[in-house]
Amino acid sequence: MAPWRFSTTGISIALRVTPRGGRDGVDGIEQLSDGRSVLKVRVRAIADGGEANRAVLALLAKSLGVPKASVRLLSGATSRLKQIAVDGDPARLDEALSRLASVDSTDQGN
């Protein structure tokens, strides 16, 4: 199951963020121990004063081709697990996220 849900204004994404990850990038989808799926994201920024959160929002905006103003933190400001909202066409965002996460429908359980 994909770690994002559709809404009337766009999409919301469950993330697991690694600050000070050595690079900015998306590392695919991970299954948590409780069964939830999250999109793994790493950023170079440190988790201090919101720097990592800002880096995550900027990375997602750039990766999904939307303005930075369209990406906002819903929850998890001080946690590695975050919920992010992205405003825009849900179908286009789903396509972009699928490409970004390299989701292969035949390889969901691995």
Image: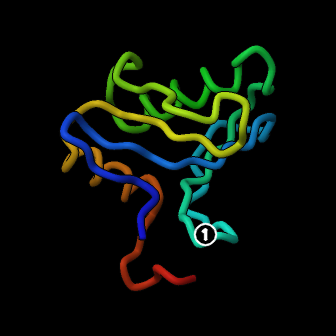
> Residue 77: percent from the left, percent from the top?
65, 28
On screen, residue 9 versus residue 11, left or right, reads left
x, y percent for residue 109: 52, 83
Left or right relative to 100: residue 47? right
Q: Residue at 39% of width from left, 85% of height from top?
A: 106
Query: Quick one: quadrant of the N terminus?
Result: bottom left
Q: Nearer the viewer, residue 42 or 83?
A: 83
In depth, the one of 95 and 4 nearer the eye is: 4
Q: Residues within 10 Å of mark 1 (few under 14, many from 20)?
A: some
Describe residue 11's horizontal placement relative to residue 17 as left or right: left
Left of 57 or right of it: where is 12?
Answer: left
Image point (37%, 38%), residue name: 64
Above or below: residue 43 compared with residue 81: above
Q: Residue at x 45, y 46 (%)?
A: 13
Q: Quadrant of residue 81?
A: top right
Residue 32 coordinates in the image, percent (x, y): 65, 66
Name the secondary structure under disc 1: strand
Amino acid type indicated by mark 1: Gln
Which corner quadrant of the image does residue 79 belong to? top right
Image coordinates of residue 98 in percent, x first then y, are 37, 58
Q: Which residue is at 67% across, 43% downward?
A: 17
Q: Which residue is mark 1?
A: 31
